Image (cartoon, coloured by chain):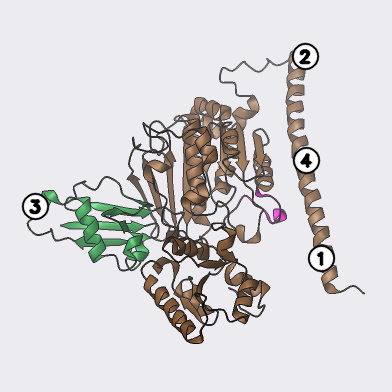
Chain colours: A brown, B green
Amino acid sequence: MMSNGGDSSEIIRELEELKLKKADIEHRISTLEAKLQDTAAVERYDTVSNGDSYPTAPELKHGLSPDQIYRYSRQLLLPSFAVEGQSNLLKSSVLVIGAGGLGSPALLYLAACGVGRLGIIDHDVVELNNMHRQIIHTEAFIGHPKVKSAATACRSINSTIKVDEYVEALRTSNALEILSQYDIIVDATDNPPSRYMISDCCVLLGKPLVSGAALGMEGQLTVYNHNGGPCYRCLFPTPPPTSACQRCSDSGVLGVVPGVIGCLQALETIKLASMVGEPLSERMLLFDALSARMRIVKIRGRSSQCTVCGDNSSFNKQTFKDFDYEDFTQFPLFAGPLNLLPAESRISSTEFKEILQKKEQHVLLDVRPSHHYKIVSLPDSLNIPLANLEARLNELTSALKEKEDGHVNTGSCTNPSVYVVCRRGNDSQRAVHYLRESGFDSAKDIIGGLEAWAANVNPNFPTY
Amino acid sequence: MQLTLEFGGGLELLCDSEKIHKVNVDLPNGAESDDFTMKHLLSWVRTNLIKERPEMFMKGDTVRPGVLLSGQLDTRIEEKDVIVFISTLDENI
């Protein structure tokens, strides 16, 4: 008899296969349906013109077909939008970068309202813990690329628009080529290096950028690089300090908050594409969900000193391609391990175990926040949270001094090393980077942090 | 001088998690109300409102990178002004 483990992996494999087949069949159905609609329209037209019993459809200057007039009628009936707005929208193309919490509602509305061509780029797959906010995805797509899932949803809402799929990460090597094909860019990402990369690329290509952000209970929205307005770098010429960016400790978000901002991104995009209304340029919308406050503040205009869009900027396509955005922001482009340090500044958790066994002199520095340290920690470690490291450097110096004095007594001659650990191994790299700049040449980080320690050395060590 | 100061995007964590502060700022000795600028206000906020990690708010005599300040350091502050400090949302302070 097979073990239970064998049974369940067999079932999971079969489920995966069936889901893939299902997605494929759904895609074929929607393609055939669209085809049928087109053929039916042509046949209707033929019958009508051959039968001579009805006048043929009139030639319309705005170029909308009878089906389009019917589909978009509620927008055509808006005096401020009207048929001109719809006609502009149908001729426009929009690229949405990120099919997550912001991209989900933005894409649904952009597909529904009739943007002529919609590009979606994302490298990630759908996960169960995405569902509460990434409302474009369905459970059937868990484990599949977000772009496939989002494109299927967009086509099922509106089979008459063109949807382009890019199942890849946006990088300096492909950004210019992809972004150049679209009129308007929507930044629905969530990290500083992507923000700078997308904004710089939009400046080089002269594209307006609809930028949204949501975290916790707050959201922000603005339009960059539009009609002489500022770019992201004009407002934030220098990246925030690394201690302010901690994806290592996930902070959470209420699903509807990015939902609100994503809808507003769709709205600003529709206004730009249809050339209707007043875009949110040189202004920023701030949304505070907890206190139910929405406020719009005036922000600085374009800076003539800006290193990218300024008057004397030498930033060009080649500079862009060579620019290291992760190094500039000291932040990884994609969730996952940061790779900030050279190999010789790092050790694995098993190597650290050997150091402990050999009783080599060292100081183990734990840079997690103190409330994390209280949950669980390695014995004989010193806790200085990354945010306080600069101010409390003397504590590390005296801990090292203590070990060194111990050495003199035992007659050993090697200097004690500093090993740095955190939860997942990102903050520890930032700390080592800083420590080495501050003269602690022996500092090394433990790759993968306490999670790696639990996985590779001590399976009984609690993770959280 | 009666002012309303608002902190958002995580900056409120530096001042007891209160987002809105209605404050009464005493002018520096000998200063006319005409002279009170954003630079003075920043130093006042740093001394009187920021409870922890001042380096997460200021760098030198201005706000640190990532904090958005509408206007310039020499922008004049007037009675009953509302001043909003926000931090980009890509960072968790």
- What is the C-alpha distance between the residues marked 2 and 1? 61 Å
The amino acid marked with disc number 1 is Ser
- Comparing B37 with A267, the one in front is B37
Badge 4 is on which residue? A29
The residue range painted magenta reads: A136-146
Q: Does residue A132 belong to the magenta stretch? A: no
Residue B62 appears at what percent x and percent y? 28, 53
Split into 4 quadrants, where in the image is the N terminus of chain A? Answer: bottom right
- Please identify, in this view, whether the residue under mark 4 or under mark 1 is nearer the observer: 1
Residue type indicated by callout 4 = Ile
Considering only order in the chain, which callout, 1 or 4, is on the residue closer to the N terminus?
1
Q: Which residue is mark 1?
A: A9
The answer to whether the residue labelled 2 contacts the one labelled 3, judged by CB atoms less than 8 Å apart, is no
- In the image, which disc is placed on residue A50? 2
Q: Is residue A423 left or right of residue A126?
A: left
Which chain contains the residue that carries disc 2? Answer: A
Task: Let me know if residue A207 appears in the view.
Answer: no
Q: Main secondary structure of the magenta part?
A: loop
Residue designated by label 3 = B32
